[in-house]
Image (tube, rainbow, N blue to C red):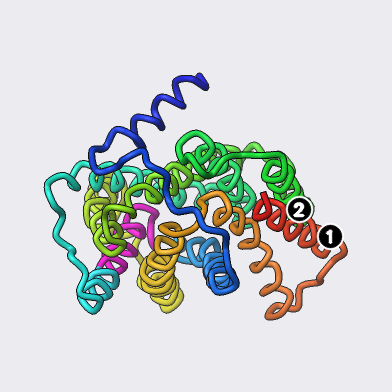
């Protein structure tokens, strides 16, 4: 099983002609990049809530299609303003198609997973992603290897997550399907992270993101028209705000920023910051909704921060 999974990932990541196996840029994260990462994780921290709100008024496949149709327009606009080459060349078509398939699979599993579980639980299962990234980077990025510090850092950070969300870990048979789907989604995100790290060295950021979204729209709308009822769509103010947040802020701005960072910095060292994402959500709840900040939240945050520090020193 393990060997088969390794071969599958290897075929996805390494067989494209546009990718060479030379070492990829993996600089240490500086202060400027650190500040951008904190902004990204803060933005992403709201995605679980925004998706959960939007799913009350729009089914998952249609939501994905609408969200990324708008997101693609935002990225195309950024590309035009930046005078980037957006037309795919012949040798880039296969990698872009592969990326769009991964993209569609990840978004579909993410939306479905959140639909069938709780927002708090979803943040835990999606936070497995940095562990998957570190393992895949060890095998597929020559200068991004696992070592003792990285392993200990990942364990510390994940344990910190479990401490913060300890009350949401309990087994619930009615949520298991959603939980499993989200673990699959986290694995797909990890594969995309490694593949993007390689592709973005040859294909500019705007072209890569634009075409993965444009091609990825096809299965979203096909699945929606096949399995979902139009009567399930209910246009409300909360839906409009949620879609704006998910499409313009996340699919547009944050995806561009993440890909630019991934082009330059270590995939495993960047991904570990994802552990901060749900903690921002807890902090916002405490600030805006006056939720109690418990000792467990403080201890968990310290563990996550210590883990991130160890991974970036590894």
Where 126 sits versus 49, above or below? above
Horizontally, residue 71 falls left or right of residue 296, namely left
Q: Is mark 1 on a helix, strand or loop?
A: helix
Give yes or no for contact between labels 2 and 1 (Cβ–Cβ under 8 Å).
yes
For disc 2, the neighbor class at 10 Å (few under 14, some 14 to 19, many from 20) is: many
Horizontally, residue 265 falls left or right of residue 283, namely left
Residue furthest to the right: 295
Q: Nearer the viewer, residue 153 or 130?
A: 153
Q: Residue at x 55, y 53 (%)?
A: 271
- Residue 109 seen in render: no
Q: Residue at x 70, y 67 (%)?
A: 282
Percent coordinates x, y for residue 283 in the rendering? 70, 72
Most common SS among magenta residues: helix
* Residue ID for mark 1: 299
Q: Is residue 117 magenta?
A: no
- Residue 157 seen in render: yes
Q: Which range is magenta?
A: 58-72
Percent coordinates x, y for residue 102 in the rendering? 35, 43
* Residue ID for mark 2: 160
């Amino acid at each position: 099983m393990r060997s088969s999974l390794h071969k599958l990932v290897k075929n996805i990541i390494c067989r494209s002609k546009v990718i060479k196996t030379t070492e990829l840029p993996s600089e240490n994260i500086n202060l400027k990049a650190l500040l951008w990462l904190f902004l990204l994780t803060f933005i992403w921290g709201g995605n679980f809530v925004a998706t959960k709100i939007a799913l009350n008024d729009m089914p998952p496949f249609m939501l994905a299609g609408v969200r990324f149709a708008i997101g693609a327009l935002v990225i195309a606009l950024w590309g035009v303003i930046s005078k980037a080459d957006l037309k795919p060349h012949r040798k880039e078509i296969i990698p872009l198609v592969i990326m769009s398939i991964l993209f569609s699979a990840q978004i579909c599993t993410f939306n479905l997973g959140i639909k069938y579980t709780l927002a708090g639980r979803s943040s835990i299962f999606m936070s497995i992603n940095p562990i998957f990234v570190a393992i895949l980077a060890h095998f597929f990025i020559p200068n991004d290897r696992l070592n003792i510090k990285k392993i200990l850092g990942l364990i510390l950070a994940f344990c910190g997550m479990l401490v913060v969300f300890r009350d949401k870990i309990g087994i619930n048979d009615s949520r298991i399907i959603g939980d499993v789907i989200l673990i699959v989604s986290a694995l797909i995100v990890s594969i995309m992270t490694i593949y993007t790290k390689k592709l973005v060295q040859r294909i500019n950021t705007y072209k890569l993101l634009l075409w993965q979204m444009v091609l990825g729209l096809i299965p979203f709308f096909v699945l929606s028209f096949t399995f979902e009822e139009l009567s399930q769509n209910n246009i409300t103010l909360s839906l409009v705000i949620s879609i704006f947040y998910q499409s313009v802020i996340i699919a547009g701005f944050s995806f561009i920023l993440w890909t630019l960072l991934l082009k330059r910095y270590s995939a495993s060292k960047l991904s570990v910051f994802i552990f901060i994402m749900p903690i921002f959500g807890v902090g916002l709840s405490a600030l805006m909704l006056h939720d109690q900040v418990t000792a467990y939240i403080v201890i968990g945050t310290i563990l996550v921060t210590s883990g991130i520090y160890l991974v970036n020193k590894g």
